[in-house]
Every structure is written in C-alpha cells, then in structure tokens.
Amino acid sequence: MGSIDDAALAGALDHETRVQAHDHTALKLWLRLLTCTNLIEGSVRRKLRSEFESTLPRFDLLAQLERHPQGLKMSELSQRLMVTGGNVTGLADQLESEGWITREPVADDRRAIRLKLSPTGRRRFAEMAAGHERWVISLFEALSRDEQQQLLRLLGKLKPGLLAGVQRGGDARPAERRRS
C-alpha cells in the first residue's frame, strides 16, 4: 500500500484481526472474503475518484446502461443496483446535467422514464471501464491465472447454495451440510 493513510485504511478494513486460532474455518474464510472485498472496493473507489473524478455508484449506473443500449427504466436501475429510487434519481440528475445520459419517456407507461447513455456518456464510460479492468487485473496479480480460475470455480460452487438460502428467507445455509 504506499502511504501511512493507505496502511491505516487497510488496518481499518482488515476484518481478520478478529480471528482467533480456534475459530471455525468458515468464519475465517468469511472474514478473509470480507477483507479482500473491502480492500478491492476501496482501491477501485480511490482510482475512480483520482483518475476520473467519479464514484463507484456512478460507475455502476453507467455500467448498467452500457449493457442495455435500449435504456433502462429508473425502477429497473434501482432493482439492479439494489438502491432506492431516490438514489438513482440523484445520480441520474448529475449525469444528465453533465451530458452523460438522456431521459426518454416510456411509450407504454406515462409515469416512467427510461435512461440511456448519451454518445458522450458512452465514450467516457468506455474510458472508465478500461481503467477499471486494468485496476482489477492488477489487484489480482498475486494469484496466477490458474489460481484465479480455481478461486472463481470455488466461489461459483458456493454461490448457488447462498442464493437458495436467501430465497428460502434469509438463511443462506445449503440444504445439505458438508464437512471439510
């Protein structure tokens, strides 16, 4: 990390400092995942701010619009970003005033508005996305390509059980427990 501020930030984000030798492996894993996620997200947030004078929520909204060239309704964006409609409205107001997005009425729903990337927004987001990709690749350089694939596979194996648990009402335990 380079500076004292970065070191202090890393310490504040390091949830593993709570782990004790006798703690269950699953608890240690959860805290390590949480720490890594926080460190990666913090790095991306700082890079977006320093290189593009932007924020992660703005990047996420633009990414959704880039994936849907036909545009998305505000309610769809709110669901995809898992934020309130007010959050989307605030971001949309900023991005529209900067010329990054346009608002269009939805033909079959007079109350709804569809957001689309403007040509300027599409060009600027492409620059941000390229930077984002470079940063994330560099953040994972400690792992070989094979190790990255293995981690991706293992997390992919974990994810369906977690999703099924959430759909059952918040209990993210797989239906069948396995011992390691």
Image (tube, rainbow, N blue to C red):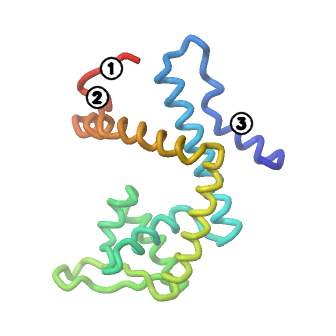
**Element type at mark 3:** helix
Quadrant housing the C terminus? top left
At a point 61% along the width and 28% down the height, the residue shown is 16
Place of residue 103 in the rendered image (x, y in percent of width and height, measured from the top left): 37, 84
Q: Which image quadrant for residue 117?
A: bottom left
Q: Which amino acid does label 1 sit on?
A: Arg
Q: Which amino acid does label 3 sit on?
A: Gly
Residue pointed to by mark 3: 11
Pointers 2 and 1 in contact (C-beta within 8 Å) = yes
Place of residue 119 in the rendered image (x, y in percent of width and height, measured from the top left): 47, 88
Residue pointed to by mark 1: 178
Residue pointed to by mark 2: 174
**Mark 2 burial class by Cα count in 10 Å: few <14, some 14-19, many 20+:** some
Say which of marks 3 and 1 sits in front.
1
Which sits in the foreground, 118 or 134?
134
Q: Which image quadrant for residue 51?
A: bottom right
Q: How far is disc 2 from disc 3 in space, using C-alphas?
A: 32 Å
**Element type at mark 2:** loop
**In the displayed image of the protein, which residue is found farthest to the front?**
146
Q: In this view, does 58 lie to the left or right of 8?
A: left
Labels 3 and 1: the sequence-earlier one: 3
